[in-house]
Amino acid sequence: MFYSGEELKAVFHKAKQQRFGIIASNVVFDFTIRGILQGYDQTKSDGLLQMSSGAVKYAAGNSKDMNTGAQLISTMIKTLSQQFKHSGVGLHIDHATPNYFDFIVYCLENNLVTSVMIDASHEKFSENIRISAEVVKIAHKYGVLVEGEIGYIKGSEDEIVSDTELYTNPEEALEFVKKTKVDLFAASVGTNHGVTKGSEVVLRLDLIKKIDDLLIANNVETGIVLHGASGLTTRQQQDAIANGVVKINKDTMYQMEMASAVQAYWEKEKDAIVKPAGISDHDYMPDKKRFDPRKWIGKAEENCSRALQELTVISGSAGKSILL
Ligand SMILES: [Zn+2]
């Protein structure tokens, strides 16, 4: 099913109390959405789908009209998710920078999303607080949750690029959460956006724990969000959750799963569309049964679904839907 903001709040509350993680999956295509929704339902896990600014522009086609793209993605998710009874999902706007303020308001007014990330992390700290608090004020009126961020997460993902890394300062995190009243909080704790190898990432578990402990001690317990988590090892993800992370973002990982599935398919089935050397035009016929896009895109869909199911087991959200 498709969750309201209130229901999504219950999802994160349960995850925080029981120390498991909710997998947030970046999507744009219908087949990814389908594979991922089926995956969440298979393992009876709640989840979150998220769309970046680049994704909504892509979805709209040449116009790049973000409102159109968001309407399309939201409608696909709402329609498809109605079929599933063992899990629920919300839709989240990923990394909306302050220049997308009007886009956020459009999504709120049209009831397209369940939560939104305002990323004003590259503004001055005081300005980040002011902008994030303003988004919280409007979003909460619509019952929509808000994720904020302080610190820089290194790497590139979609339109978000940072050459530098700036770890989140726990005292600033506390001030930020208190003043903005965000529901979720993205911390820069060593992960990088894009392709990474977990074994090379120095995940600052000490920092996650320090932030979490400080927020709890001040009665503003908030779900910590881990960005740039695609390449992390099982152990790293579980340690992060044990120390206070409640939402784990996955984007690059699905892109790799899709690309590798399609590459493997075409390596094997190349002769379905390319005439092998040494065969005459007369003897060769392309094979519609194998070049039908549903066949090879279907492999990408299956891979996304399988990868998501494994993730819900790793994060502990499998079998924990609030609907059960
Ligand atoms: Zn991110």
Image (cartoon, helix red, strand yellow):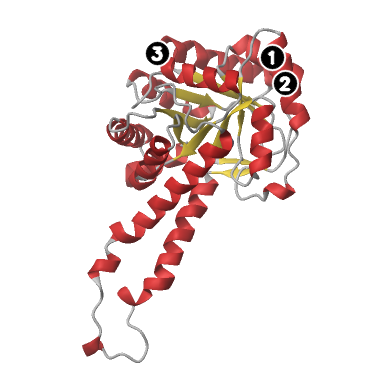
Say which amino acid is labelled 3: Tyr
Pointer 2 with pointer 3, Cβ within 8 A: no
Residue count near mark 1 (Cα–Cα under 10 Å), binned few <14, some 14–19, many ≥20: many
In the rendered structure, which disc, 3 or 1, sits on the residue that comes first in sequence? 3
Can residue 262 be spotted in the picture? yes
Q: Position of residue 121 (x, y in %)?
A: 63, 27
**Quadrant (top left/top right/bottom left/bottom right) for the C terminus:** top left
Quarter of the image for residue 323 reads top left
Image height of 129 relative to 258, above or below: above
| Image coords of residue 254 (percent x, y) | 49, 48
Identity of the residue drawn at 25% across and 88% down:
281
Q: Quadrant of residue 5?
A: top left
CA gap, disc 2 and disc 1: 6 Å
**Label 3: element kind:** loop
Which residue reaches farthest right? 206
Q: Which residue is mark 1?
A: 215
Q: Gap between marks 3 and 1, in whole Å?
A: 25 Å
Indicate the quadrant containing the N terminus: top left, top right, bottom left or bottom right.
top left
At x 25% / y 84%, what residue is drawn?
Answer: 284
Residue that badge 3 annotates: 142
Instruction: Confirm or deny contact between disc 2 and disc 1 (CB under 8 A).
Output: yes
Q: Secondary structure at mark 1?
A: helix
Residue 259, position in %: x, y?
Answer: 47, 58
Looking at the picture, tell me which residue is in the foreground, 98 or 19.
19
Viewer-proximal residue among 134 and 32: 32
Mark 2, residue position: 211
